[in-house]
Image (tube, helix red, strand yellow):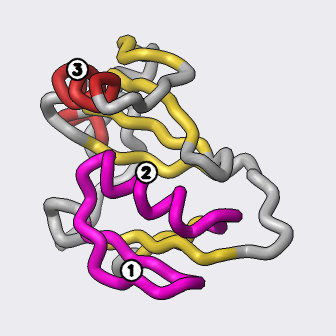
Amino acid sequence: MNLNQITLGVHNMEQATTFYRQLGFLQIVDTPHYARFECANGATFSLSLEDNMQPNNTTIYFEHEQLNEWVNELQTKGITFDSLPENKRYLWREAQLRDPSGNKIKLYWAGDNRLNPPWRTERRND
């Protein structure tokens, strides 16, 4: 089984699509109520216009090996961060921001620790 995509609710599609294009994602679907973006690795995520959209506790993570450079580039584009890149106790380096609808986003780099942290509990028997 594979994860297909994540859909985030937004309250203003134009603001949201502009924001995610500024982050560097390729927009592959553009309608007044729905948009889909492609990541460099081919994974996708989408946005859905919600009339009474309320931010929730969901966080979407985007990984980039050159995290510091990416954050610096985004700051020059006017993107505001809640926290800048820092090393976390769970062995990831991450920065946090929010999209125009208040959805929480973490930009991070974890390297091998993403799938193989020292505390990993199970392995596939392939």
Q: Residue at the location (19% across, 34% down)?
A: 111
* Residue type marked 3: Asn
Q: Which residue is mark 3?
A: 68
In magenta, the rendered stretch is 9-38
Crowd around label 2: few <14 · some 14–19 · many ≥20 (10 Å): some
How much space separates mark 1 and mark 2, taking CA atoms? 22 Å
Left or right of 28? Residue 82 is right
Q: Residue at the location (81% across, 57% down)?
A: 54
Q: Residue at the location (28% across, 80% down)?
A: 28
User: Could you say whether the residue bearing mark 3 is in a helix, strand or loop?
Assistant: helix
94 or 88, nearer to the observer: 94
Left or right of 75? Residue 83 is right
Q: Closer to the N terminus: mark 1 or mark 2?
A: 1
Q: Residue at the location (36% across, 13% down)?
A: 87
* Residue type marked 1: Asn
Q: Quadrant of the C terminus?
A: bottom left
49 or 113, nearer to the observer: 49
Q: Which mark is residue 4?
A: 1
Residue 119 colored magenta?
no
How much space separates mark 1 and mark 3, taking CA atoms? 28 Å
Q: Mark 1 or 3, which is nearer the eye?
A: 3
Q: Closer to the N terminus: mark 2 or mark 3?
A: 2
Crowd around label 3: few <14 · some 14–19 · many ≥20 (10 Å): some
